C-alpha cells in the first residue's frame, strides 16, 4: 500500500475493518483487534496513527519487529499477519514510519489471542459472546465434520425406500443433471450421489433423503413433519393437527397435500368456459420453494426439532429448525448472495431431483414469484432455535385499512397476536400452574425474554403471583 492509499484508509476512520494505534506500546490491544478482525472479514491495524486519525509515526527498530512477532505467537490457531513499513515522507531525518498490519479472514475459526476469542462490533473490539463463539465453532466444524456425512450407525440398505431412490435418479437423468449410471443397484446409486461414507456405509444424508415413508426411525426422531391449521390468528385452537415421519421427499409431498386441502382458493368464471377456474391463494411454486428450503437448510443435528407448517386465517408460516449461519441475515437472503447450504449433499440431491433450480436463489425466486402475483414478499425471521418464513394471505390483504400496505397489515396482525401474550400465559397457567418459563415459551412460540416481560407485567398488575421458590414452586392466577 502506498502513502496515498494509506492516507485514504486513515481518513475513513476506525471501522469494523480498521483499528488505529498511536504506537506499538499498544501491541497487546492491537493483537486483540487482529484476532477480532480474523474472526470476521479481516482488516487492518495501523501503528503510528492516533485514534483521531492524526499521523504521528514511530521509530521502528529490529527490536520493535521482534516484539511484534513474539506477540503474534499468541494467536490460536496461528495467524500470518502481513506487515508493511511505510515512511512518513521521503528523506525524513527522523526516520519515523507507520506500521500497517493486515490480516485476512481466518480459514479456521474461532481464533483466540492468549486463550480468549475476540469479535469486532462496529469500531470496537470486545471479548466474543459465548453464543457467538459456539455458533462459529459449530460452523467451523460443519466444514469438515458435517452431520449429514457421518455414518448412519445401525441402518442398512433395508432402511431405505429404494423406489424413492430410483425415482430421484431417473428424474435427474431426465433433467440432464446426471448421466445414467447404467445400474439401479441401490448401493451403486448412493455411491454415484456421494451418499456413502467409510466405504459402503450409508450416510445420515441418505437416510434423511430416502428412509422408508411413514416409518419412524428411533435413532432419527427428527425425520418428521408437523402440520396444523389453526382457527383465527393464534395457536389457541386447532382445526387440523397432524404429524408424519419419513424421508424429506415424502414429507414435502405430505406438506403440499395438507396445503392443497386447507389453503384458500380464489375462483372465477372465464367467459367462454363452462368450468370455474380455481387459483390457490399463494403461488404454488413459491410455497414449494419455501418448503424445499426448510428441509434442505434445517439443523438435522437437533433431534427435538421438525419442519413445521402452520396455517392461520391471515398467514402461512413455514418453520425450519436451526439458525442462519455463515453471517447470513434475513435481509441478505432477499438480496443476491453466495450460496452456503448447511447440508450441501442433501441440497445437491434436491437439485438433481429438480425440486430446486439453482443454489443461492431460493429466497430470490420466492420474492419474484410473489411480486409477479401481486402479493407482498414474505418475511423471514429468526426465532428461538428456528427460522420462520411467513406469507400473508390475500384475504388478510383485502382487510387493509385505507392507505395501509400488506406488510403493515401483517405487522399489525402479528402485533395484536403478540399483544395477547399475557392473556395466553394466564390461560396456560390456570391449567398448568407448575409450568416453567421455557415451557411457556415453547407452547406459545414466543421467546423466553418475551414471556418473562409478560409475567413481570402480570405480577405488577396483581394478576399473577409466585407461590414457593423458583424451583419447586408454582404460579397462582389471581382472578
Image (cartoon, helix red, strand yellow):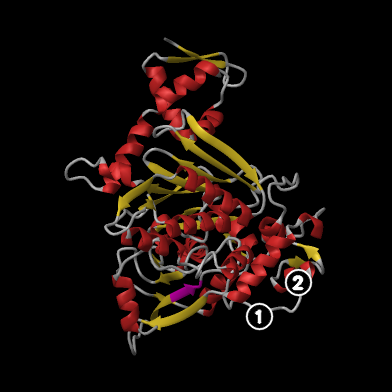
Q: Secondary structure at mark 2?
A: loop
Dominant SS of magenta comes to: strand
The answer to whether 107 is drawn above or below residue 236 in the figure is below
In the displayed structure image, the side of residue 377 where residue 253 appears, left or right: right
* Residue at 38 percent of width and 18 percent of height: 460
The Cα–Cα distance between marks 1 and 2, rounded to whole angstroms, is: 13 Å
Quarter of the image with the C terminus in it: top left
The answer to whether 332 is drawn above or below residue 82 in the figure is above
* Residue at 47 percent of width and 62 percent of height: 33
User: In the figure, residue 73 lies in which quadrant?
Assistant: bottom right
Q: Which mark, by number, is residue 184?
A: 2
Task: Tell me if residue 101 is in the magenta stretch.
Answer: yes
Residue 234 visible here: yes
Q: Secondary structure at mark 1?
A: loop
* Residue at 57 percent of width and 59 percent of height: 296
- Where is residue 113 drawn, in percent x and y? 57, 60
Give the extent of the magenta segment.
Answer: 100-104
- Where is residue 233 drawn, in percent x and y? 39, 34
Give 99 or 415, whichever is nearer the viewer.
415
Give 55 or 349, whichever is nearer the viewer.
349
The nearer-to-camera label among 1 and 2 is: 2
Seen from this angle, which residue lies furthest bottom?
Answer: 91
Give 475 or 79, whichever is nearer the viewer.
475
User: In the figure, residue 434 lies in which quadrant?
Assistant: top right
Say which label, 1 or 2, has the lower sequence index.
Answer: 1
- Where is residue 111 drawn, in percent x and y? 58, 62
Check disc 1 and report the residue beneath it: 179
Amino acid at each position: 500500500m502506498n502513502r496515498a492509499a494509506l492516507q485514504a484508509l486513515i481518513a475513513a476512520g476506525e471501522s469494523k475493518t480498521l483499528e488505529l494505534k498511536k504506537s506499538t506500546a499498544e501491541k497487546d490491544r492491537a493483537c486483540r483487534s487482529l484476532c477480532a478482525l480474523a474472526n470476521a472479514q479481516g482488516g487492518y491495524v495501523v501503528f503510528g496513527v492516533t485514534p483521531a486519525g492524526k499521523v504521528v509515526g514511530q521509530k521502528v527498530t529490529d527490536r520493535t519487529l521482534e516484539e511484534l512477532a513474539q506477540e503474534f505467537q499468541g494467536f490460536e490457531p496461528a495467524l500470518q499477519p502481513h506487515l508493511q513499513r511505510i515512511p512518513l515522507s521521503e528523506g525524513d531525518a527522523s526516520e519515523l514510519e507507520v506500521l500497517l498490519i493486515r490480516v485476512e479472514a481466518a480459514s479456521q475459526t474461532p481464533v483466540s489471542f492468549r486463550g480468549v476469542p475476540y469479535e469486532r462490533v462496529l469500531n470496537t473490539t470486545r471479548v466474543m459472546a459465548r453464543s457467538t463463539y459456539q455458533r462459529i465453532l459449530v460452523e467451523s466444524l460443519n466444514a469438515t465434520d458435517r452431520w449429514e456425512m457421518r455414518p448412519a450407525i445401525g441402518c442398512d440398505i433395508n432402511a431405505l425406500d429404494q423406489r424413492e431412490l430410483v425415482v430421484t435418479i431417473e428424474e435427474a437423468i431426465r433433467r440432464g443433471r446426471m448421466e445414467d449410471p447404467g445400474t439401479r443397484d441401490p448401493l451403486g446409486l448412493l455411491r454415484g450421489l456421494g451418499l456413502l461414507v467409510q466405504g459402503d456405509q450409508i450416510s445420515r444424508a441418505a437416510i434423511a433423503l430416502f428412509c422408508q415413508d411413514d416409518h419412524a426411525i428411533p435413532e432419527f426422531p427428527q425425520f418428521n413433519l408437523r402440520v396444523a391449521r389453526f382457527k383465527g390468528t393464534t395457536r389457541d385452537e386447532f382445526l387440523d393437527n397432524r404429524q408424519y415421519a419419513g424421508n424429506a421427499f415424502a414429507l414435502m409431498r405430505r406438506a403440499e397435500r395438507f396445503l392443497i386441502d386447507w389453503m384458500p382458493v380464489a375462483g372465477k368464471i372465464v367467459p367462454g368456459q363452462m368450468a370455474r377456474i380455481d387459483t390457490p391463494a399463494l403461488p404454488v411454486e413459491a410455497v414449494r420453494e419455501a418448503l424445499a428450503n426448510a428441509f434442505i437448510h434445517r439443523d438435522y443435528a437437533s433431534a427435538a426439532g421438525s419442519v413445521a407448517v402452520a396455517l392461520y386465517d391471515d398467514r402461512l408460516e413455514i418453520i425450519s429448525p436451526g439458525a442462519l449461519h455463515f453471517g447470513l441475515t434475513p435481509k441478505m437472503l432477499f438480496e443476491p448472495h453466495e450460496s452456503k447450504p448447511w447440508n450441501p449433499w442433501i441440497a445437491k440431491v434436491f437439485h438433481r431431483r429438480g425440486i430446486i433450480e439453482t443454489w443461492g436463489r431460493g429466497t430470490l425466486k420466492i420474492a419474484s414469484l410473489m411480486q409477479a402475483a401481486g402479493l407482498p414478499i414474505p418475511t423471514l425471521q429468526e426465532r428461538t432455535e428456528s427460522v420462520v418464513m411467513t406469507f400473508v394471505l390475500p384475504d388478510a390483504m383485502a382487510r387493509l385499512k385505507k392507505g395501509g400496505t400488506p406488510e403493515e397489515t401483517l405487522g399489525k396482525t402479528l402485533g395484536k397476536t403478540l399483544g395477547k401474550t399475557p392473556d395466553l400465559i394466564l390461560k396456560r397457567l390456570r391449567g398448568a400452574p407448575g409450568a416453567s418459563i421455557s415451557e411457556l415459551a415453547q407452547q406459545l412460540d414466543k421467546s423466553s425474554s418475551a414471556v418473562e416481560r409478560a409475567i413481570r407485567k402480570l405480577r405488577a398488575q396483581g394478576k399473577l403471583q409466585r407461590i414457593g421458590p423458583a424451583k419447586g414452586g408454582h404460579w397462582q392466577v389471581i382472578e
